[in-house]
Amino acid sequence: MSQFFTLLMAWIAGVGLGAIFFGGLWYTIRKGLASRQPALWFISSLLLRTSIVLVGLFYVYNLHCDRLFLCLVGFGMAGLSSTWLIQARNQTKARTLNGDRHAP
């Protein structure tokens, strides 16, 4: 049971790291495009997000490849789900702007 809990926590950590990384990317794009200095936003965000993910991966890894693999799987799942959520949000916004107020 302990091994299962450890692997589950590695997967949850991967999802959390992915949420931080891709959520930070979404926030950076929204704020960076409206900023007077977008390069500062994008470069500092990239360094901060990458540093957080690398430290998190190093902490989870701890010389166990199975933990690292599950953490990376969770990270990838967070990336896919964030892409799906943003596309769904944009489609809803586009339908609202076009005046489509009925079910698809």
Image (cartoon, helix red, strand yellow):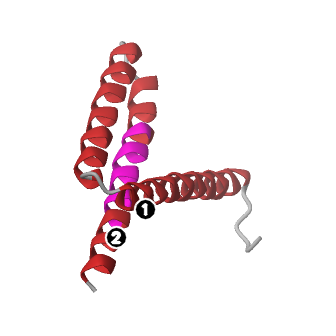
Q: Could you classify mark 2 by the number of other residues whose Cα lies within 10 Å: few (under 14), some (14-19), or many (20 or more)?
A: some
Which percent across, then down, holds residue 78?
A: 47, 57
Identify the residue shown where x is 56% and y is 55%: 80
Task: Find out whether the residues at labels 2 and 1 contact each other: C-beta distance under 8 Å.
Answer: yes
Over which residues does the magenta segment extend? 12-25
Q: Secondary structure at mark 2?
A: helix
Residue 42 belongs to the span the image colors magenta: no
* C-alpha span from label 2 to label 1: 7 Å
Quadrant assignment, res 60? bottom left
Q: Look at mark 1 in the image and give the residue it sits on.
A: 70
Q: Classify 10 Å Cα crowding around label 1: few (below 14), some (14-19), many (20 and above).
A: many
Q: Position of residue 32 (x, y in %)?
A: 41, 25
Residue 53's disc number: none
Q: Which residue is mark 2?
A: 7
The amino acid on which the numbered mark 2 sits, given as a three-letter code, is Leu
Residue 66 x, y percent position in the rendering: 40, 61
User: Quick one: 68 or 74, which is closer to the camera?
Assistant: 68
